[in-house]
Amino acid sequence: MKNYITTLSSSKAAMIVGIAFISSVFIVTLVDDFLLANFVVPGDTNALAKDIEANGRIFAVAVVGYLIVLALDSIIGLALYVVLKPANKNLAFLTSGLRLLYAFALVIGVFALAFKIIDVYGYASIKLVGYIFFALHILLLGYAVFKSGYIPKSLGVLLMIASFSYAVFFVDFNLPTSMKTSIMLIMAIAELSLSIWLMVKRNRLPENSFYGNNQ
């Protein structure tokens, strides 16, 4: 894996980021809006066990779907390292690492929930930790994009703004549903915009040290 990452070109890594992100959005939409639309998990392990038994196949498919999404998140993190490395290797490493920590935290939570080790409240706590890692990842990603010199600064600014919008997951602001939807839309647009730009402009990305800033 290490050898593959070190030899992967920026153009291929950019395409991987785009495809993986769009695929993850599709799978999350399928799981949340269709598979789990009417699947309500109560806040205790006994009730959770009954719900899983009654909806075993749906729950199993949903778990697999989420694990695939988290695997795609890990792939995105590694590919972003390749894309950002020409500008600043250390910043690229930290940005990638935070996304991997997010995926790792949620994988633990999903497995613990699936095996009924924790209830839905325990899962929510683990998920919150994951979202903190993810918000920091998006903030650092925005900064890395802004400072890169070869990706539009506007995308970096949009990502940094989106990172602060994750506060809605950390603090209960009692916001209207429409406002929460708008905030989540900003999050999606920020990453989607970067993904599409990388796919379209992938052949223009630098492969080596850029401006001599590869620290």
Image (cartoon, grey):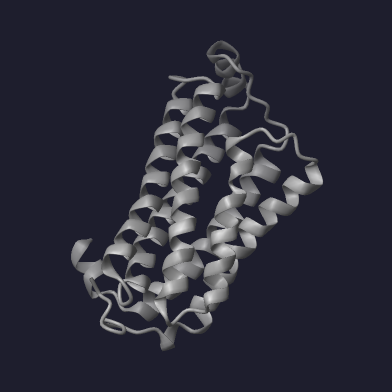
Residue 158: percent from left, percent from top: 59, 66
Residue at the outermost left position: 3
Q: Is residue 84 left or right of residue 134?
A: left
> Which sits in the foreground, 163 or 96?
163
Question: Which residue corresponds to the image point at 45% horizontal and 71% vertical from the top-left?
Answer: 145
Snapshot quadrant of residue 5: bottom left
Question: Which residue corresponds to the image point at 40% horizontal and 84% vertical from the top-left?
Answer: 205
Identify whether 192 is placed above or below 7: above
Residue 56: percent from left, percent from top: 57, 28
Q: Is residue 118 left or right of residue 12?
A: right
> Which sits in the foreground, 16 or 132?
132
Residue at the outermost top position: 46
Residue 184: percent from left, percent from top: 67, 51
Q: Is residue 133 left or right of residue 194?
A: left
The quadrant of the image that shows the N terminus is bottom left
The quadrant of the image that shows the C terminus is bottom left
Question: Which residue corresponds to the image point at 60% horizontal and 39% vertical from the top-left?
Answer: 169
